[in-house]
Image (tube, helix red, strand yellow):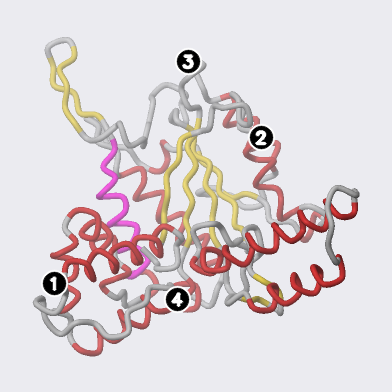
Amino acid sequence: MYIAITRQQLGDNFRGSVRDFVNYLEKENEGKSLEQQELYFNQEENNIDAERVIAEIDANTAKLGKKDPKFYSIVVSPSKRELEHIGNDPEKLKQYTRELMRTYAASFYRDREVTVKDILYFAKLERQRSFSEKDKAVRENQPFASQILELKHQIWNIERGEGQGNVIKLKERIQTLEKEAPHQQNGKRIVPGMAKEGHQSHVHIIVSRKDVTNSHSLSPGSKFRTSETTLNGETVKQGFDRDRFFRSAEKTFDQKFGYRRNFVETYHARNLLDKDPKLFFALLLGLPTHEKQAARQLLFKAGVQVPTLPTNKVQLAYRALMQLRKGIGKAMESGSIGI
């Protein structure tokens, strides 16, 4: 399960209003009839239209400055293995999202209990994901992409009379490179922006920074870690417990759908890989044989080359450890492994 929390972008593309972001999320609805479109949902309702989302999020910004984010985006992106486990069922994903938002509310560190009823949010299910520069297939196709681009530049120069060469042969070379690229989908070279095959369902959540009463700020941003401060002589709790949120999100999915999560799919594993890679690999080596084999398969499918997992810590040389760490880290970033 890959979950990311991002604050509102306040640059040239996304200013003040949530409208630009909502318009971006409407990309899968383009050209579809109303009956075919995927609308928004929240904790209690379905089929909420985009204009209502914009109106309610934009109206819920009392006492926030121009440079303060007005909302946060949460992306909930299950791995292919997780989607297969639930049959890529959109209703199950919506059920999970609603449970996830209960966890989100409970992760705020406050003197009073924060519940999902305090949270103003809207969520939208999407069915497609696209390849990005982080994906293994795109990275390994890049040398071919660079050669193809250079050949196209040569053709453009020749056609403008600014160069010499055989255009037909250059085009034939381009066709050869297109076919030789190691990663293909439906007979075409995989490039950034190409839609991925298979189950790709995920959920975008827009959550207001202010609570439903428009009175209290609820910021899950990374700088708002759990802490206690003194205000008017009294100790006040503040912040958002991200570790609790991510761990609970994972546990909720597993318990709700009976999912057996491998070690390399866990949030705990990701933390270890970042903070203590030696312990990460020590625990990986210590898994029962069948779980270790399953871990190897997951890593291989995610594009991490692991011909044979070392049988002990001595065999795991430092250089090999760092190479594996780099490969697994990229797989996690791209969401290939469900962490």
Please report the residue visible at 53 percent of the width from the left and 41 percent of the height from the top: 206
Residue 139 drawn in magenta: no
Side of 22 where 73 appears, left or right: left
Q: Earlier in the sequence, mark 1 or mark 2?
A: 2
Prevailing secondary structure class for the magenta stretch in the rendered image:
helix
| Location of mark 4 (residue) | 81
Q: Eyeballing the image, is 156 above or below 63?
A: below
Compute the Cα span from label 1 to label 3.
48 Å
| Location of mark 3 (residue) | 65
Q: Earlier in the sequence, mark 1 or mark 3?
A: 3
Compute the Cα span from label 3 to label 2.
19 Å
Disc 1 marks a residue whose amino acid type is: Ala
Disc 4 marks a residue whose amino acid type is: Arg
Q: Eyeballing the image, is 335 above or below 306?
A: above
**Foreground disc of the pair 4, 1:** 1
Residues in magenta?
240-255
**Foreground disc of the pair 1, 3:** 1
Q: Position of residue 311 (x, y in %)?
A: 15, 85
Mark 2: secondary structure: helix
| Location of mark 2 (residue) | 20
Side of 224 where 37 appears, left or right: right
Which residue is farthest bottom? 290
Mark 4: secondary structure: helix
Residue 246 drawn in magenta: yes
Side of 17 where 165 appears, left or right: right
